[in-house]
Image (cartoon, helix red, strand yellow):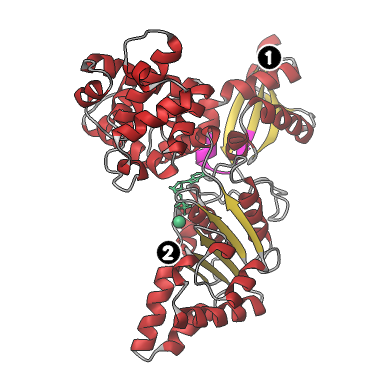
Amino acid sequence: MDNSTDSIIEPTTFDTTKIWSDFLENAKVATSTPHFNAWFAPTFLISIAQNGERYIAEIGCNSTFTKNTLEQKHFGLIQGYLEKTLGQAVDLLFVIKQRPESKVNEAPLLGAPLFESMEHDQESIRQAIFRSGIRLTYTFSNFAVSSTNQMAHAAAEAVAGEPGSAYNPLFIWGGVGVGKTHLMHAVGHHLLHLDSSITIVACTGEQFTNDIVEGIKTKSTQKVRERYRKVRVLLLDDVQFIAGKDAVQEEFFHTFNTLVGSGSQVILTSDRPPSEIAKLEDRLRSRFEAGLIVDISPPDFELRCAIVQIKAQEKGLHLDMDLAQMIAGNIDEARQLEGFLTRLVTESKFKKLTITKELIETLLGKGREGQIEDRNTKVTPHELIDAVSKHFSVGKRALLGDSRVKTIAEPRQILMYLLRTQLRLGFEEVGRLVGGRDHTTVMHAVDKITNLASSSVDIREDLAGIKHKL
Ligand code: ADP
Ligand code: MG
């Protein structure tokens, strides 16, 4: 009889809500904010049951994505905490389940379930997303948050909670690849998950312009108007494109007034704030400024790590944190991160190479091929040498010379790294420019800095400082 309890699972009377909220407080401190928001915030503790000598804790996750990540990456953290709190061994069981009480306005993270939502009965949502022109993969649940985009994220969540009344319009601006489109589409996604019958149009300033021009040409302006003026939500990307085009601005002014006047939500994105968009009609500018304007700055290292992990998962790639850090430490922009992961997938799947630190090092060392528009391609080697010399206050002669003193040798290695990765010069060419060194010395320097960029904040700041000077 003694061991008869072994196979009997008995419910317990723990206060699961309290235990989990304490755990979340803990996890907030133990992980980074983007991680916390992405993986922990959308979870809850369903139950704790006694199973022989052990407990089984059932943890609800909002998506398979969250579930897999927690299982693979944060199992120990959760288990350790629960065992300490409950004073007994705990097994974890992750299940996909929405938090029962979570309402749109209260949910800390509006994680529209991305993957499982696509199953069977969600076909109508999928259709609606498709019709609206919203990107299927741009959701809140795979949008990582850090200090650089926190305001914009909060504003987007607010708008998703109360479309038409929280902030109208919501104007999001920032540089290329900072996540403006992603965030804007996430709002649309969320709303269609709540009600797939609402009409949403997601388009770019360019598409809007083309539609208007086409409407004028084919005398079907009325039809075009109806398309844009009858929506519940208009997501207009890169609105700066309509500036300077009189007929288009005129049309947009009326569209905008009709929408906002009838309580429909408008979200706009742009590469700069309204006040800096040249040739934007004053009346449009003042309309845009009447809502909420938020900006997103380039992603910091922490956020880039989270983006790498999210994008890697989406590509079916498992990347350990140190590998993600290596990538995030060496690549500054979100789009380039994605491009890099695509290359990594190609290498690993088609060439059947396992993803190792060395493989990543090699790919990073090859520079940013395929990024023709990279602004640094216009920089000459001499400008780069200048910038490094100034940044470290090391004279050019010393920089290109033979001194092995760390304060000179390290800047020299950084120079070699940047010549290789930013200007995409060959190892020989780099060696020639840097005092006639051979290619193995250059390779060694590039590898060393690639590694340091993933582990050292100082090096990352040096690299960013030099790039900024260019
Ligand atoms: P923008 O519109 O500002 O130029 P996008 O929204 O197109 O930028 O984002 C570029 C890429 O980077 C997309 O693949 C997007 O999913 C990704 N990205 C940017 N910011 C984030 C983030 N915070 N979390 C997850 N992915 C992000
Ligand atoms: Mg965009």
Which residue sits at x=58%, y=33%?
94
Q: CA distance from mark 1 to mark 2?
A: 51 Å
Mark 1 or mark 2: whose residue is earlier in sequence: 1
Horizontally, residue 88 falls left or right of residue 207, namely: right
Q: Nearer the viewer, residue 393 or 455?
A: 393
Q: Amino acid at mark 1?
A: Glu
Q: Which residue is mark 1?
A: 53
Residue 365 x, y percent position in the rendering: 30, 27
Horizontally, residue 39 falls left or right of residue 27, namely: left
Q: Amino acid at mark 2?
A: Phe
**Ligand 1 has an atom within 8 Å of the beta carbon of the residue at disc 2:** no
Q: Is residue 131 magenta?
A: no
Dot 2, crowdedness within 10 Å: few (<14), some or many (≥20)? few
Q: Is residue 355 visible?
A: no
Stretch of the chain drawn in magenta? 59-67
Q: Residue furthest top?
A: 404
Q: Nearer the viewer, residue 3 or 301?
A: 301
> Which mark is on residue 317?
none
Say above or below: 302 vs 126: above
Q: Which residue is mark 2?
A: 130
Q: Nearer the viewer, residue 314 or 461?
A: 461
Residue 419 x, y percent position in the rendering: 31, 29
**Ligand 1 has an atom within 8 Å of the beta carbon of the residue at disc 1:** no
Q: Is residue 286 visible?
A: yes
Residue 47 x, y percent position in the rendering: 70, 33
